[in-house]
Amino acid sequence: MKEKMCLLWLVCFFSTAMAQKKEFTIKGHLTGANVPLKVFLYYRDGNSKFADSTMAKNNTFTFTGTIEHATQASIYAHWLYPNKAKAPENANEGIELMLDNGDISIEGEYLRTAQINGGKTQEEFIAYRKKTDSLGNAVYQIWKEQQDELPEDSIASFKRLIYARGKLIKETVKSFINTHPKSELSFSILQSNTLVIEDVEYVESILNTLRPEFGKFDRFKEIEQKVMLTKRLSIGQKAIDFTQSNDKGDMVSLSDMKGKYVLIDFWASWCGPCRMEYPYLKSAYKKYKNKNFEIIGISIDDKESLWLNAIKSNNFEWIQLSDLKGKDNAVAKMYGISAIPQNFLIDPQGKILAKNLRGDELNDKLKGIFKE
């Protein structure tokens, strides 16, 4: 179960080799219904996100484009029934596939049951997903059985199973990459698993495996730089000082908070997952604001009105900073933020005490600190 986050795709520039552009074509033909069909394509290529759509003609659709490296894509089919209330369950459906150099064909009645034919990367993707999906399904079935038998412990058991599933998937990922060190899919998996780097040693081992084949590319260098920054910002390291303007126009520095426990919280007004954290932040601040605890919110907004309205409408009482440069926020770059929400808990000596405390984890951590 992945944590929900809003992507920023902060860009790093390096004077290294650029990958030769790949050209892809997707040709689909779905015969499941005799109503208009609209198809959507979503994918990302490094630091850029792409979205495309088309109305099928005679149930046939085509997408074309260029990418720098093979990448995972999502396709959604929307059958436009005149009476939505009578539309079948598969009126809206989606699948995932791999875009690489060359053609991909999608043939069948409906998207989820269609035959997908592509190149070697797509074949590898199908085999890889079968392994990872089977792990997820097995964990879910075990949880369902435990929930029926031990309903009072279902949440705790589910968390244990999710941890075990994550560990198994990491092993599966590493095994696949070790046996496919030249595969574009392996490089794509590395990129998708380094949005937020939690296990530096794990990522470094994958980088070492893929370096002979992909080490010359810009995107590989970006991940290496991100690993270096993650080490610089690991627990126990000195937090990077910064100064930025608050919502009243005054300059505030992290060093101004010396002697306090400080939560640096990266967020934005448009970030849905951030909103899910608001109640926990408010609870923590109300409980500990008079006990040597402060929150510094760093907004990734680029429009002042949206930023200020979010502060006011949500009744945020803690410090709010932003340079209104969006994904180019200077503090976000210092801290390697490429997705939000993220946070860093700093101790009174200015050292990083914890990272990415979500939900009740924040209150649990503070409860331990303040001995409640």
Image (tube, rainbow, N blue to C red):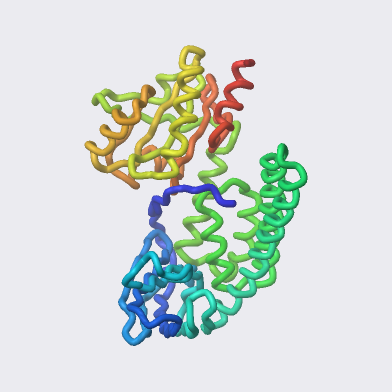
Q: Is residue 245 left or right of residue 236?
A: left
Camera-nearest residue between 209 and 171: 171
Camera-nearest residue between 275 and 90: 90
> Which residue appears farthest toward the right when viewing the image?
149
Measuring 66% from the left and 59% from the top, which residue is drawn there?
A: 136
Where, by quadrant of the figure, is residue 185 drawn?
bottom right
Residue 102 visible in the current orientation: no
Where, by quadrant of the figure, is residue 304 drawn?
top left
> Which residue appears farthest toward the top when viewing the image?
290
Q: Position of residue 269 (x, y in %)?
A: 33, 40
Q: Position of residue 312 (x, y in %)?
A: 29, 28
Where is 213 relative to 173, above or below? below
Residue 77 visible in the current orientation: yes
Q: Is residue 204 left or right of residue 80?
A: right
Q: Position of residue 291 (x, y in %)?
A: 51, 13
Q: Quadrant of the C terminus?
A: top right
Where is 45 relative to 253, above or below? below
Where, by quadrant of the figure, is residue 308 drawn?
top left
Q: Is residue 363 left or right of residue 36?
A: right
Q: Position of residue 36 (x, y in %)?
A: 33, 78
Measuring 61% from the left and 76% from the top, which residue is drawn there?
A: 124
Measuring 50% from the left and 50% from the top, which residue is drawn there?
A: 226
